[in-house]
Image: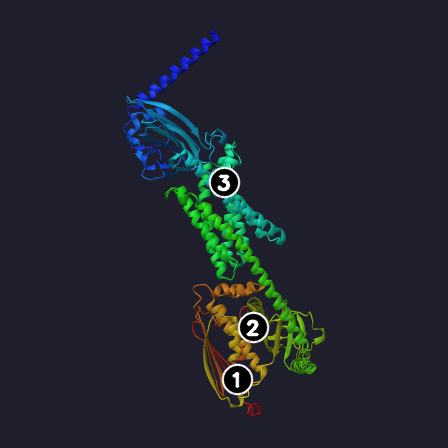
């Protein structure tokens, strides 16, 4: 009995404490201003409450029920202007209040549904207004993703609370909502029987949707087994992960797959979004053959695959708010890449992209509606809530059709290829069946062509040869034996450069110029033509010949085809009398060599070859001096050191492009008559003291002659008159002809 009395005492104390708490609530609640009331109609199946609610935002989440129901925050409540409250992603806690009145003569039972399954925590408080104006707490409940699904009173994917509204009474409801997902809370009173029927219809439709996913997965799995096409495997994994993502989004996964795993129920969403995007991008990359048809979009798709993988992995340790926002952006980015990529692939001939493009456009519409709903930009309704299911259902079917269409296209391409092979084989047979006469005629023409080639090459007086890319001989005709006394049978492997003439004297610069020309030819691979002095059978005297080189490809191998030939006699020379020309050239040594030959070519009518050669050597030396020492201001010491260090041409190029030298020119004037030939060479340099070199003699050379005055000494031996201006940058050279009746008659 004592124990029983003690128990009764404890019960009474608890009752007193509870009564005091209730008294505190209704005393403070009595001060609450009048709320917009919604009348509960007994015959109504659904009554949306959105515009009948008021909301209070608590950014810090610090408000308590006591402070909220007291009058200190009445002014902070704001009426809801939309049928479905939607405040996007926010860390704030939202308090919702509304009033429901039952004016009928019978008590009413209803289900209060919050139709967004991704809310983390919902606290429900309901107060009944008493006839005296006081209120009494009559119901308190709690639900959300933070709690096991098994604890819910009504086992439904959304949050459903049973409420009781007595006849003639008013009930004031308070909801405290907190979530890391979108702050969306469509609030609806539903008639209990109608709610059960609606839930059955909804489950039936979801069954159809997920049945489509399973059927598509199984159907394409069998196709994968038979075809071994990896596109099918990518597609199967994509729709399976996307199906799991949809189940997690609409609360069915929490209800049926992991009802007690609270942490996973929340973090599964960004994980499945990442995996779905990864597999969709992989499928698109392979199915559209992006590297082949659109390399730029293929690189973007690779980046999106990497980002999707990162999202899937980071969902396990990165804050949920960050991953779920990324999970809203990433699918949009992938679709905005896939659609133009598919359009471009189709435009460039990938016919399999047709159904793929339609599928992703359909899905895109659904994603746009769903994403904008979650982000709070468009209202929450049936179309926006189930936009992903509708769009993705069409997408999965269309993608399966696209895979089947791809098989048909591949089969047709295979059939076409087989027809082409058959046609090619028939053509080969037709070619093999050509008449014996035609084949014999072709052989006869081939033999004739070979004979003509042999006569043209082996019978030519010009040296015709081929070199490898290291400038070593491969072949040469017999003319090389006549001109240079070399055996063509032993020429293979001989370096071409070894045939150039050169000694410590004047021809050394000529050889350097030829070497530069060869280096330029190897670098540019453009056809080249130049004059070169070759070693002749008379060792002391070089043989000058024109050289032509050109790269050719023979049997897939690069070779150099060359020809060396003597300058032919001018048939019009017998009519030549006189000539006068003027040239203005830049600071290029190759030009100096070419112009020297140009202004001496007509001297053969009046002079012997050895005399012309002497004129050429001296004139070229004067022109080169005008370039080197005049315009480019290179001292004799600098030139000598550069030649020793093998950087002569490098120094020339440096000086050519110096600002003070780039526009300097050398002027060469030339006139010839029966009596004499005259050359005037002028540069734009500072000149020099020519008198120091005019008194020497080439017959008695000294150190000055060998290093500094060679050009002037050669010129004195070659010409009869030499005169400089005062500055020393302008020289006139005159050679008088010794008339020979035999020479003139030979020219005529």
Precedes in sequence: disc 1 or disc 2: 2
Q: Which residue position holds label 2?
A: 527
Q: Nearer the viewer, residue 604 or 411?
A: 411
Precedes in sequence: disc 3 or disc 2: 3
Q: Nearer the viewer, residue 364 or 206?
A: 206
**Residue 317 seen from this side:** no
- Residue 706, image quadrant: bottom right
Image coordinates for residue 709, horizontal then vertical, percent = 53, 71
Image coordinates for residue 230, horizontal then vertical, percent = 59, 52
Q: Is residue 748 above or below residue 362?
A: below
Calculate the distance from the C-alpha at mark 3 to the C-alpha at mark 2: 72 Å
Determine whether the residue tagged by mark 1 lies in a helix, strand or loop: helix
CB-based contact (under 8 Å), mark 1 and mark 2: no
**Residue 494 seen from this side:** yes
Q: Nearer the viewer, residue 462 or 146?
A: 146
Which mark lies nearer to you, 3 or 2? 3
Q: Which residue position holds label 1?
A: 602
Residue at 46% of width from left, 43% of height from top?
Answer: 327
Disc 2 crowd rating (10 Å Cα; few below 14, some 14-19, many 20+) is: some
Which mark lies nearer to you, 1 or 2? 2
Which mark lies nearer to you, 3 or 1? 3
Determine whether the residue tagged by mark 3 lies in a helix, strand or loop: helix
Disc 3 crowd rating (10 Å Cα; few below 14, some 14-19, many 20+) is: many
Calculate the distance from the C-alpha at mark 3 to the C-alpha at mark 1: 99 Å
Image coordinates for residue 530, horizontal then vertical, percent = 56, 75
Q: Which mark is residue 654?
A: none
Precedes in sequence: disc 3 or disc 1: 3
Q: Which residue position holds label 3?
A: 247
Answer with left or right where residue 143 lies relative to residue 33: right
Q: Is residue 365 above or below residue 139?
A: below
């Amino acid at each position: 009995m004592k124990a029983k009395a003690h128990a009764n005492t404890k019960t009474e104390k608890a009752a007193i404490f509870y009564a005091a708490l209730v008294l505190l609530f209704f005393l403070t609640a009595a001060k609450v201003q009048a709320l917009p009331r919604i009348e509960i109609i007994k015959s109504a199946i659904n009554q949306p409450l959105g515009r009948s609610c008021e909301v209070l935002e608590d950014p810090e989440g610090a408000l308590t029920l006591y402070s909220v129901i007291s009058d200190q925050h009445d002014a902070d409540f704001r009426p809801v202007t939309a049928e479905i409250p939607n405040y996007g992603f926010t860390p704030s806690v939202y308090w919702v209040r509304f009033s429901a009145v039952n004016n009928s003569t019978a008590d009413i039972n209803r289900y209060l549904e919050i139709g967004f399954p991704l809310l983390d925590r919902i606290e429900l408080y309901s107060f009944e207004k008493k006839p005296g104006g006081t209120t009494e707490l009559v119901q308190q409940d709690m639900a959300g993703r933070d709690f096991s699904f098994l604890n819910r009173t009504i086992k439904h994917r959304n949050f459903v609370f049973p409420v009781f509204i007595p006849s003639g009474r008013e009930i004031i409801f308070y909801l405290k909502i907190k979530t890391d997902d979108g702050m969306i809370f469509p609030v609806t009173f539903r008639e209990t029987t109608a709610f059960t029927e609606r839930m059955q219809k909804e489950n039936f439709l979801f069954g159809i949707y997920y049945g489509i996913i399973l059927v598509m997965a199984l159907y394409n799995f069998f196709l994968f087994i038979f075809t071994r096409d990896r596109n099918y495997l990518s597609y199967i994994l994509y729709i399976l992960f996307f199906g799991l993502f949809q189940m997690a989004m609409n609360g069915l996964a929490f209800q049926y797959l992991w009802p007690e795993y609270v942490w996973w129920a929340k973090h599964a969403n960004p994980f499945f979004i990442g995996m779905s995007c990864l597999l969709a991008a992989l499928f698109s990359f392979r199915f559209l053959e992006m590297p082949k048809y659109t390399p730029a979009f293929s690189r973007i798709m690779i980046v999106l695959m990497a980002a999707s993988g990162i999202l899937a992995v980071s969902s396990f340790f990165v804050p949920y708010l960050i991953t779920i926002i990324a999970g809203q952006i990433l699918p949009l980015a992938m679709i905005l890449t896939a659609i133009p990529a598919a359009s471009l692939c189709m435009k460039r001939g990938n016919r399999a992209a047709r159904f793929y493009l339609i599928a992703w456009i359909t899905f895109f519409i659904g994603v746009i509606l769903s994403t904008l709903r979650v982000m709070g930009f468009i209202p929450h309704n049936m179309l926006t809530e189930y936009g992903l299911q509708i769009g993705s259902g069409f997408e999965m079917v269309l993608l399966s059709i696209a895979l089947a269409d791809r098989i048909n296209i591949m089969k047709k391409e295979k059939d076409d290829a087989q027809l082409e092979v058959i046609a090619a084989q028939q053509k080969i047979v037709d070619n093999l069946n050509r008449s014996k006469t035609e084949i014999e005629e072709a052989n006869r023409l081939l033999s004739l062509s070979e004979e003509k080639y042999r006569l043209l090459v082996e019978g030519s007086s010009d040296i015709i040869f081929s070199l490898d890319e290291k400038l070593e001989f491969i072949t040469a005709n017999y003319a090389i034996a006549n001109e240079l006394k070399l055996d063509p049978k032993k020429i293979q492997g001989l370096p071409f450069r070894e045939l150039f003439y050169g000694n410590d004297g004047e021809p050394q610069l000529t050889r350097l110029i030829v070497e530069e020309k060869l280096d330029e030819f190897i670098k540019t691979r453009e056809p080249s033509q130049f004059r070169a002095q070759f070693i002749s059978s008379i060792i002391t005297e070089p043989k000058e010949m024109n050289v032509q080189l050109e790269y050719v490809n023979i049997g897939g191998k690069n070779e150099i085809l060359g020809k060396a030939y003597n300058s032919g006699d001018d048939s019009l020379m017998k009519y030549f009398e006189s000539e006068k020309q003027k040239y203005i050239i830049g600071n290029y040594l190759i030009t100096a060599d070419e112009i020297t030959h140009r202004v001496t070519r007509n001297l053969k009518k009046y002079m012997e070859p050895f005399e012309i050669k002497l004129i050429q050597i001296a004139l070229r030396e004067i022109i080169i001096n005008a370039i080197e020492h005049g315009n480019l201001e290179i001292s004799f010491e600098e030139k000598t050191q550069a030649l020793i260090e093998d950087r002569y041409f490098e120094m020339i190029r440096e000086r050519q492009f110096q600002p003070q030298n780039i526009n300097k020119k050398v002027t060469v004037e030339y006139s010839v008559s029966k009596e004499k030939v005259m050359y005037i060479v002028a540069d734009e340099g500072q000149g020099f003291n020519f008198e120091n070199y005019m008194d020497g003699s080439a017959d008695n050379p000294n150190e000055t002659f060998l290093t500094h005055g060679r050009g002037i000494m050669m010129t004195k031996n070659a010409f009869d008159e030499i005169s400089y201006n005062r500055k020393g940058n302008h020289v006139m050279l005159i050679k008088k002809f010794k008339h020979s009746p035999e020479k003139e008659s030979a020219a005529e």
